[in-house]
Image (cartoon, coloured by chain):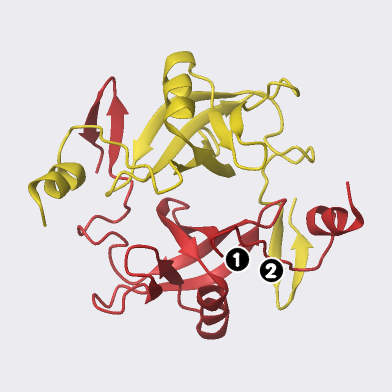
Chain colours: A yellow, B red
């Protein structure tokens, strides 16, 4: 493993690794219940904005632009802590959600489970 | 919203949505502690193999191939439940891990938190 990779995995230097599309994976978790609320992608701009403002920003792949979560709904995610994975291409954000995280009105986007070949609501 | 999208978000039909690279995001969570263990990508083959065998499979983007988590380490992730998000482009797998989930030996890949501009170990 290269020195850069050792530092990336074991070191204290934050060196986020964006993929070929310029994105990394960002998972939002409720800081109290620890429930996974949603998962989306961040580019460098979304990560900078999130760190600057304390509000979760993502990169919308469908709209091709910066997306402040809650910009239309008011359901912001206030980021309390950011965790980074071994190869620094994924983040977990512990958040205080100001309303349902899902655009459908559900608390979490993961409101269904797979039972055999069908989905069943769990909330 | 189209009828297809309504069914995708509200229905009971499992219609996983792979992106332009043929991938969706898969998050592995410890089914007991609810800790996030790792996050990676699945293509259709990895998803099929996961459902068939009950062991988490991913698509390795760096190696460009199917990857059975634990194939070299023996640290398999036994999948107990699969949850699906609103637009069906992300999964949460509740797993029983047979050893550390991270290749570094850490229980979870998310073993550091961002403190200002530096990373600090939390495990």
Chain that bears disc 1: B
Q: Nearer the viewer, residue B54 or B96?
A: B54
Does A106 appear above or below B43?
Answer: above
Q: Residue at x 29, y 56 (%)?
A: B107
* Contact? badges 1 and 2 (CB < 8 Å): yes
Specify the quadrant of the image occupied by residue B114: top left
Q: Residue at x 68, y 46 (%)?
A: A109
Which residue is denoted by mark 1 in the rendering? Answer: B82
Does A29 appear above or below B12?
Answer: above
Disc 1 to disc 2, how far (Cα)? Answer: 6 Å
Specify the quadrant of the image occupied by residue A1: bottom left
Q: Is residue A34 visible?
A: no
Which residue is denoted by mark 2 in the rendering? Answer: A114
Q: Residue at x 12, y 48 (%)?
A: A6
Q: Nearer the viewer, residue A24 or A93?
A: A24
Q: Is residue B95 left or right of residue B48?
A: left
Q: Secondary structure at mark 2?
A: strand
Q: Position of residue A116 (x, y in %)?
A: 71, 78
Q: Is residue B72 left or right of residue A5?
A: right
Residue at mark 1 shares a chain with residue at mark 2:
no
Q: Secondary structure at mark 1?
A: strand
Q: Residue at x 28, y 59 (%)?
A: B102
Extreme residue in the bottom direction: B52
Chain that bears disc 2: A
Circle 2 crowding by C-alpha within 10 Å: few under 14, some 14–19, many from 20: some
Q: Position of residue B50 (x, y in %)?
A: 52, 77
Q: Position of residue B21 (x, y in %)?
A: 53, 61
Q: Position of residue A79 (x, y in %)?
A: 49, 25
Extreme residue in the right direction: B3
Image quarter hosting the C terminus of chain B? top left
Q: Nearer the viewer, residue A113 or A38?
A: A38
């Amino acid at each position: 493993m290269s020195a850069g990779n050792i530092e990336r995995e074991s070191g204290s230097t934050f060196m986020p690794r964006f993929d070929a599309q310029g994105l990394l994976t960002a998972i939002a978790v409720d800081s109290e219940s620890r429930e996974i609320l949603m998962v989306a992608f961040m580019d460098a701009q979304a990560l900078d904005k999130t760190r600057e403002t304390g509000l979760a920003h993502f990169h919308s792949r469908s709209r091709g632009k910066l997306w402040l979560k809650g910009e239309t709904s008011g359901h912001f995610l206030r980021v309390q802590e950011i965790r980074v994975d071994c190869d620094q291409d994924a983040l977990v954000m512990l958040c205080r959600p100001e309303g349902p995280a899902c655009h459908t009105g559900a608390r979490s986007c993961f409101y269904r489970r797979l039972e055999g070949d069908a989905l069943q609501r769990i909330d």
